[in-house]
Image (cartoon, grey):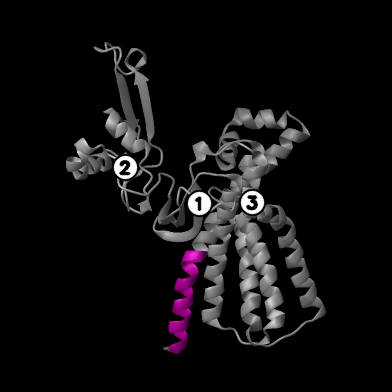
Amino acid sequence: MYPMLREGVELEQYEASEDPYADFPENLDAVHCYAENPDGDLFAIDADIFHALLHADGRGPLPLPPSLLDDADDIISELVSDGLLQTSRFVKSGDRINRFVLFLIPERTPNIASLCRGIQLTLPIAAPLLLAAGFLLQFFYPATGGAFVLPLYYALFFLSLFLHEIGHLAAGFAYGYPLRDLSILFLGYFPIGACVACQAEEVPHRPKEEIQFSLAGVEVNLLLAGIFLLLSLLVPAARETFREASLTNILLFSVNILPASHLDGEAALSALLGVESASDTARLWLQSGRRRRKLLHEGARGIGFLFLFLFVRLAQVLLFVVIAVDIISPVFSMAALLWRYT
C-alpha cells in the first residue's frame, strides 16, 4: 500500500514569532513545522515533508518535491519509524480494535449523490415494512421442507456483510462525507466485522445525517432479512437456506444496533447526544461518584441518563460475550464433529 498518514498524527505549522516550541527563533519570517505521533512524540520537520504528509492518503506515492525523490525510500522509512506514516494495510490502534484496509475509496467518486440521498430517504421506511411483509406472508403461507444449501448460505452471508457496508458507503456519498477506506475489523487478530472509515475531523456536524449514516448498514440488514423471507416462499428448493439467511441478518441487526464501542448503535447514540463517544461518556459518568450523585439529583431526566449509561456499559459486556461465542463456537463445533465421526 502507498504511504498513508497514521491515524492520530497531528500536523502543526507556526510562524516563527508564534512558535510555542522555539524560545529564541533566529528568523522571525520563517515557518516552523511539527508532527506529533499518536504516542505524543513531537518531531520538527521541514516544510516539504510537512506538505507531503498533509497529502499522504495512501492513494498514491508520497508527494515529495523532485529534490527529495532520490532519498524517498529513506525518508519514508524514517517517517514510518517515527510513527508518522504507515505502509501496511493492517492498522493497529490502542483500544484492541484493529483493522485491515481492503481498499481505499477514490477521492473523486461518481456523481451519484442524488441517487444515494433518495436511498437514504426510503431505506428507513422500506426496510421494516419489507421485513414485516415477509413475516406476515410466512404466517399466512406456512411451508416446510426445502434443502439447506451450505455454499448458498455462506454466499448470502458474505453478501449481507458486503451490502451492510455498501449501505454506509451510500450514506457517505449522499451527505458528501470524506470517505477513506473499507476495512475488516479485528479484535486483536480475530475478525469481528467491517467498517467504512472517513476523516472524522472533516465530517460536518449534522446530527440527523450522522445518525442515518450510522444506521444505514443495519437498515440494509433489515431489508435483506425481508427479501430473504420472500425468497424462501418463491424458491421452495432453498427455503431453509433463505430463512437462515434472513435470521442471520436479523442477528447482524441486533448486534450492530447495540450502543457498544465501535458499533453502529454507539455511533448513532453519540450523534444523538452530541458527544464524540457515548461509550466513553457513559464510562466517565459511571466511574465518578460525584457525577452519579449529580444525575440522581437531576430528577427523572438524570435517572433516565443513568439507566441509559448503565445500558451502554452492559452493551459493551454483551458485545464481548458475542465475540467470545463467535470465536469459541467453531472450536466446539469441530470437536463435536470429530467426536461424532471417530
The circle drawn on residue 109 is: 1
Mark 1 or mark 3, which is nearer the start of the sequence? Answer: 1
Q: Is residue 47 above or below residue 179?
A: above
The magenta segment is 326-341
Residue 163 sits above or below residue 39 on the image: below
Q: Which mark is residue 85?
A: 2
Q: Secondary structure at mark 2?
A: strand
User: Picture coordinates of residue 134 (x, y %)?
Assistant: 75, 72
Measured Cα–Cα span from mark 2 to mark 3: 35 Å
Between marks 2 and 3 in the image, the one whose residue lies nearer the viewer: 3
Identify the mark nearer the N-term, 2 or 1.
2
Q: CA distance from mark 2 to mark 1?
A: 25 Å
Q: Which residue is mark 3?
A: 114
In front of the other: 118 or 185:
118
Residue 16: image x %, image y %? 32, 15
Rendered position, 338 above or below 159: below
